[in-house]
Image (spheres, coloured by chain):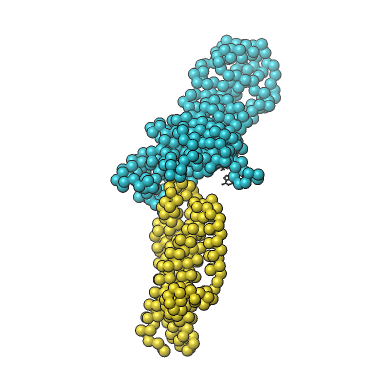
Amino acid sequence: MITFDQVSKVYGEKAEGVKALDEVNLHVEEGEIYGVIGFSGAGKSSLIRCVNLLEQPTSGSVTVNGQNLQELSPKELREAKRNIGMIFQHFNLLNSKTVFTNVAMPLLLSKTPKKEVTKRVYELLDFVGLRDKADSYPDQLSGGQKQRVGIARSLATQPSILLCDEATSALDPDTTNAILKLLKKINQEYNITILIITHEMGVIREICDKVAVLEDGKVVESGSVFDVFSQPKTTTAHNFVSTVMHDQIPNSVYELLQKQDAQNKIYRIVFVGESTGTPLLSQIAKQYQVEVNVLFGSITELQGVPFGNLIVQFEGEEKEINRVIMHIHQQKVSVKEVLEDVG
Amino acid sequence: MLVDWQQIIEALWQTVVMVAVSLFFSALIGLVLGIILVVTRKGHLWENKYIFTVLNAIVNIFRSIPFIILMVAVIPFTRLVVGTSIGTAAAIVPMVLFAGPYIARLIENSLLEVDPGVMEAAQSMGATPWQIIIRFLIPEALSSLVLGATIATIGLVGASAMAGAVGGGGLGDLAITFGYQRFDTIVMLITVGILVVMVQGLQSTGNILSKKIRRR
Ligand SMILES: Nc1ncnc2c1ncn2[C@@H]1O[C@H](COP(=O)(O)OP(=O)(O)OP(=O)(O)O)[C@@H](O)[C@H]1O
Ligand SMILES: [Mg+2]
């Protein structure tokens, strides 16, 4: 649906310019919700703006629906943009126009018959739950309501792609969740492919299928949300994951680590999917001569799959502990000794 | 009093005509220039360094010439346009040349205040450059444009008073020839009073209109 092929973006003159994107490759499948996460200045906005050519890539190509938009005439490009909706962090609504006119705007631009415009706008306002606000002005709305207007507007031309640049970053957590639910609904009901840019890992966890981590203009890691969350490969990805997964080992546990010896070891056990349901620890306590001591644990749901993270202490003979680890491995559950220097 | 009310009303009418006609033409010129000054700037719809630089310089030159000097300097041009260099019609020409560039700057400022995010949204919807100007830029700037127009109109009232100096007629002419040169204090007070009321009225109307457009 959207393919980035070796896309680079340099602002300013080549020599002293800022390289915002550095040979980015990315592929978004039809019907997917794809998230791109990165710190401020990583190049996220530049990336998403290259999709509808608000920004021209300096090199490389972006293909949307099999079309390289850079090769289109201005007229064809405007036509193609009607297939790509976009919503913004600061909503970017017309303050001088009513909610109705704001939502109608993309249709008015293409000279859609008036009757059709009215019908479509009310349909959209119903969808985002703002029919009663049709005659209000944007400054009479809350942030969440403004974003709903932005969403309704972006859907007016029935696009097959929706671009979201930090669409929830100006909203409080509850409103963020409501907007994310709405985006999910759009994805499911209209089968619209969504590309989301964010610096909040919570957004990725809530609705994305795939994620790419952007750092200094490069995609340092990408894959399914599940894989990246359960096994982040880079430090950046790991840091983002721990902002929402709470898999950081508490300090008190670190203190225990100091006292660790052959008869007293600490492990991190990661349960995925069905294995979360098995009573692994109680089996161990019954079958082996070890004391099981749970130091820390959390279970999160990712893409509807439970994902557990336990930190346990085994006390007992070294030989016996090794047998326990063997046993865990046999259950196809990931287990790793926690050493002092790993986070 | 050396003049009768008939003369005062006639002078008031001349002032109104001078201001209204020159406002019409200078707003037209200002709107076109102002929009061009915005859209030809770097990174804008029709970025064009040459057009921008040249227009910018022309506007600055006109803005730096004092009105009284401009009035005298353009006499040949005035004659060319209206056939005479004296009278109400003749005063309108320098007034337009004075206010046009001024209004261009005011409009430029108002349009530049429009949130770039709104333009971005317009572009993402596939709006043509014209649609962006007509449907996004101008409506978003309208309330501030009205305030600008108010300031410009008041400036023109002031200029029309000075136009009296070249026999343009109007309240300013009356104030100078009778009030100032023949020491008729009453005429002076009446004309100044009318001008004050006029300016107050214009400013209040502009404020109310602008507020109404903003709807807050
Ligand atoms: N129009 C521009 N001109 C010059 N440099 C720019 C421009 N836009 C972005 N940059 C630079 O490019 C880099 C990437 O910017 P970008 O806006 O894509 O980052 P971002 O990840 O969206 O950041 P944020 O989270 O703060 O929005 C930054 O160093 C920024 O300063
Ligand atoms: Mg950004």
A16 left or right, relative to A165? right
The colour with which the image depicts chain A is cyan
Count of labels in the image = 0
Depth check, front residue: A123 or B65: B65
The relative height of residue B116 versus residue A282 in the rendered view (above or below) is: below
The colour with which the image depicts chain B is yellow
The relative height of residue A272 versus residue A236 in the rendered view (above or below) is: above
Residue drawn 49% across and 85% down? Answer: B180
Locate residue B113, reporting x and y percent: 50, 56
Locate residue A284, reporting x and y percent: 57, 13
The relative height of residue A310 versus residue B53 in the rendered view (above or below) is: above
User: On the image, which quarter does residue B61 sit in?
Assistant: bottom right
Depth check, front residue: A63 or A19: A63
Residue drawn 64% across and 20% down? Answer: A337
**Can residue A144 be seen by looking at this rendering?**
no
A123 left or right, relative to A316? left
Locate residue A189, reporting x and y percent: 38, 32
Locate residue A152, reporting x and y percent: 39, 42
The relative height of residue A328 versus residue B201 in the rendered view (above or below) is: above
Depth check, front residue: B163 or A149: B163
**Can residue B120 be seen by looking at this rendering?**
yes
Residue drawn 46% across and 46% down? Answer: B123
A94 left or right, relative to A214? left
Quadrant that contains the C terminus of chain A: top right
A266 left or right, relative to A271? right
Residue drawn 45% across and 86% down? Answer: B178
